[in-house]
Amino acid sequence: MKLWGGRFEEGPSKVFERFSGSLHFDRRLVHADIQGSQAFARALEGVGILRASERAELVAAFDQLDADAGKTEFFEGASDEDVHTLVIRKLGEKVGALAGKIHTGRSRNEQVSLDVRLWLRGEIDRACELLADLMQALLDCAGRDPAAVVPGYTHMRRAQPVLWAHYLLAYFEMFARDYERLQQARARVNVMPLGSGALAGSGFPFDREAMARDLGFDSITNNSMDVSADRDFALDFLYAASTTMLHLSRLAEDWILYSSEEFGWLELGDGVTSGSSLMPQKKNPDSLELVRGKFGRVFGDLNSLFVTMKGLPMTYNRDMQEDKEPLFDAADQLCGSLQMAREVVATARLKPERPAQAAEESWVVATDLAEALARSGTPFHQAHQIAGRLVLESVRTGKKPSDWNAESLKAFAPEFTSECAAVLNPSEGMKTREIAGGTGPQHVAKALGEAQVRLAKLRA
Ligand code: ARG
């Protein structure tokens, strides 16, 4: 079926029909389309186009369609141009000529905006729930090894000792910002466009605020031309999704390394790893590699819509139909990756002795030493020099920090004090970092408690 045709002497060619049809992907919007059309039927009653009995008949028929749409037969053999056309045709099969009234004063340009907003709102809520689940898994992971010490890295070189929990809380912060960004995108999505017509505003005096309330929108759009032209709300989501995927990809990269034989810090769950068809010993982190890989795809979706929208003249252009596949793909990949990452985090086990050994045998305590010297009055520049010379000497002679003590330090440089000897142990040096945002153990314990409260607030 077509929602147009009167003006044409010939129908569309097969090639054009196949090329332009969107039903095979926008069928995903069917429930949103039906929900929006039910609200629109109520609005049509409000402006006297439908009698109460007609509105009731249409709403009931839409309820049946909504149930039918859950079955695969619903779409079988359908050759409608898009989901909006399909729904109206199916409505006609149920209520006959009355279906011809449902599109009064409505354009598909606003309908597609409405449907995508309704659908996307649900996807954002689902993504936020999954994100919160992942954040909880990170906190649980921190709770399993609250005292574990690991080397923190810069330039992928051992830098300073930190608590494993502090490292995990860094990701908690990234994901907390992602949650916020998704909510900000949701606020842009949750604006009601109906009543805009094709571009000039509807010719029927709909109570737009009532429609917004009916469909759970926070507000109504301000300009009908903007509605037909705008996909910012989709771009906002794609950006938030890309940033979340970026963080997931970095976590994935870390954990691929940390679970390697070279690091040996983490044992990944059997359930999230796979073997090799040839090498019997392999236990590969495919789940994390896929999470890392899917960033490219979601970022590609963001780019795709950006480039589609660039330079489009006001207002609607058919190019904009190309918004849906990247949007659907990004939502799927985001939710899938969040779920996967949560399972990896929940089933991984830290082997704390390995990172502790890495921290002890390297010179990650050098900064603590220099700062201890500075605390006892040595100018920091000189303290840095002394600690640097101690490292050089140790590297030459194969000494670890624990091979030194108060006496040998003092013999090496008279500036060394007993506090300096204490911080040769990474766990001791960390205690000097009891500052807001730092890895001091008391602060981290507090931060973990606060993170739990923040997460509960997000979920509420
Ligand atoms: N399938 C179209 C889309 O997704 C619906 C809008 C059609 N509007 C039009 N003027 N052809 O963008």
Image (cartoon, rainbow, N blue to C red):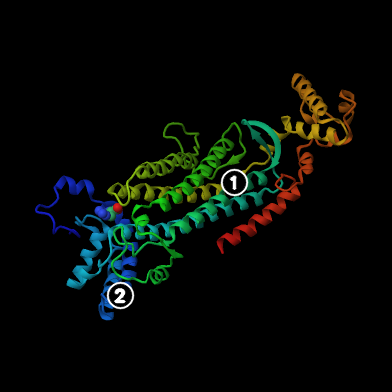
Ligand 1: image quarter = bottom left
Residue 429, horizontal then vertical, whole percent: 78, 39
Instruction: Identify the residue at image location x=22%, y=57%.
Output: 76
Task: Out of 128 and 7, give the one closest to the viewer.
Answer: 7
* Visible residue check, residue 73: no
Circle 1: residue type: Tyr
Q: Is residue 340 above or below residue 420?
A: below
Q: Residue beneath label 2, please?
A: 47
Secondary structure type for disc 1: helix
Circle 2: residue type: Val
Instruction: Identify the residue at image location x=70%, y=47%.
Output: 437
Q: Is residue 253 above or below residue 321?
A: above
Q: Is residue 6 above or below residue 170?
A: below
| Quadrant placement of the N terminus | bottom left
Q: Which mark is residue 171?
A: 1
Crowd band around label 2 with a 10 angstrom C-alpha radius: few (<14), some (14–19), many (20+): few
Residue 423, horizontal then vertical, whole percent: 81, 36
* Visible residue check, residue 27: yes
Task: Out of 305 and 252, give the one closest to the viewer.
Answer: 305
